[in-house]
Image (tube, grey):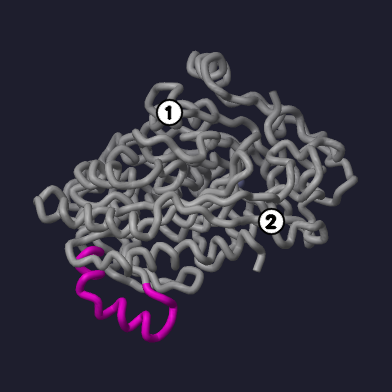
Amino acid sequence: MSTLGPVVGYEPGTVDLHPPGLPGACRARIWERSRFEWYSRDGGDPLQLLTEFAASQGVHLADISASPTVTDAFTCGISVLLAPPSVTPSPAPSVPDLVAVAYSHGPRRSPEPGTTVAYSSPGTVNVAPAPDADSPDSGRFASSLTWRESAPPLAADSPGVSEISDFSAGSPGGVSAIGPWTPSWTEAEHAAAVDGVRAAIARGDVYVVNLVGHASAPFGAGPGLGSGSGSGPGPGPALARVAALPGARYGGVLRGERWWVASASPETLVAVAGGRAVTRPIKGTRPATAQGRAELLASAKERAEHVMIVDLERNDLGRVAEVGSVRVDELFALRRWSGLWQAESTVSARLAPGVGLAELLAAVWPGGSVTGAPKLAAIDVATRLEPVGRGPSMGACGWIGHGAPGPGAPHGRVEVDLGLTIRTVAVADGRAHLWAGGGIVWDSDPAAEVAEAAAKTAPIKRALRGW
Ligand SMILES: [Zn+2]
């Protein structure tokens, strides 16, 4: 089987479809080497599967407290999309629950359509075997799950390259045929769910619950979903606009053969460098005006809800941290995202010896800012009240790869930077899907919650339309 080839356009007139979190310095020289796609119905623990796949690609995550080195010059990293655990079916079931795409460094591409990319240097990526491809784990992956090894680098007539040329800015891809949006609940149903949370708070079950709604729309950007075949620009140009929204720290696009996901997320679920883990919960939103800023800073409700989530994150990180190392580096800092003020805090901790990515994610995922507190009770309340499953939203997307070279690590050390998939759109089976949530506390106003959810999705809907 083949991989999807280069996914990035870099020259003027091409569309930038880099995966979320990819280091900018590597963008023009990475190639997809291997990918792993998993659906919860396949069984198994996604955190373990991710760790095993990464190991098969030479990225060792079993103990990230000790800053493992990247062992070769060819490995760039692994792009990750991880849906939250869910008992409710996703409205976009074609999107996998875990995607891990491994990239290798290769020669810098010539993105000019019609040119052949030369790949003569020995040991380049797509032809190199995975560093431990002979290990028993690799065989198990290959036999039981979707794991595609890449073909040699692409010639200009391959589907991947032709698709990039299809995405040129001059193609009829500027304005997409999208809409109308159909919410999975009415405003009245949304307001009733807010009241349902308030009832759970009154019973003493929870303090705060993040309630997530969903809407979908027909997305008529033409065929070419993943394959590059057919006419029309495909969803690439529209999704690149989503990924480029201002404040999108984890802006990027991932795609498979039958699905696309674009993130404009500003929120760090967890990042690890040098053995220290950081999370940056966002909670509290107002319009990006002077009045909105003053309101957000003065709101006792927003601050109380925010501090509850910060406490939850401190507690979560504390489960995998060295004793006494958890600290709040920044509390209730205001940051802009696409016309909104959002309140963000930074919580960090030194990882206890021996902690791997799976243990870390088990402690912090799903992120407290999209569950509520106490976490398990809040998830239970939300699951009963939300109209559909969260799909790939409210999970994780980002990058696991090399940091800067340094002493003892000529190819860099493994760093993790995973965003939380808020402000994220999925495209599959001819429809675009959007989710938006808000934290509900006792004094939440149902009408205000409905308005806040609309404010969070409006920039993404505009970006998809192209104006
Ligand atoms: Zn790289």
Q: Which mark is residue 177?
A: 2
| Circle 2: element type | loop
Which residue was labeled with disc 1?
40
Image x and y of residue 170, in percent: 82, 61
Q: Which residue is pictured at 49% across the width and 28% down the height?
A: 38
Image x and y of residue 458, in percent: 51, 65
Q: Are marks 1 and 2 in contact (CB under 8 Å)?
A: no
The amino acid at mark 1 is Ser
Q: Is residue 379 visible?
A: yes
Q: Which residue is pictured at 36% across the width and 69% down the height?
A: 285
**Magenta span:** 286-306
Q: Residues within 10 Å of mark 1 (few under 14, many from 20)?
A: some
Q: Nearer the viewer, residue 143 or 394?
A: 394
Q: Which mark lies nearer to you, 1 or 2?
A: 2
Q: Nearer the viewer, residue 461 or 337?
A: 461
Q: Nearer the viewer, residue 249 or 258?
A: 258
Q: Nearer the viewer, residue 271 or 379?
A: 379
Q: Which residue is pictured at 30% across the width and 81% down the height?
A: 295
Query: What's the CA distance linking mark 1 and mark 2?
Result: 32 Å
Q: Is residue 296 magenta?
A: yes
Q: Quadrant of the C terminus?
A: bottom right
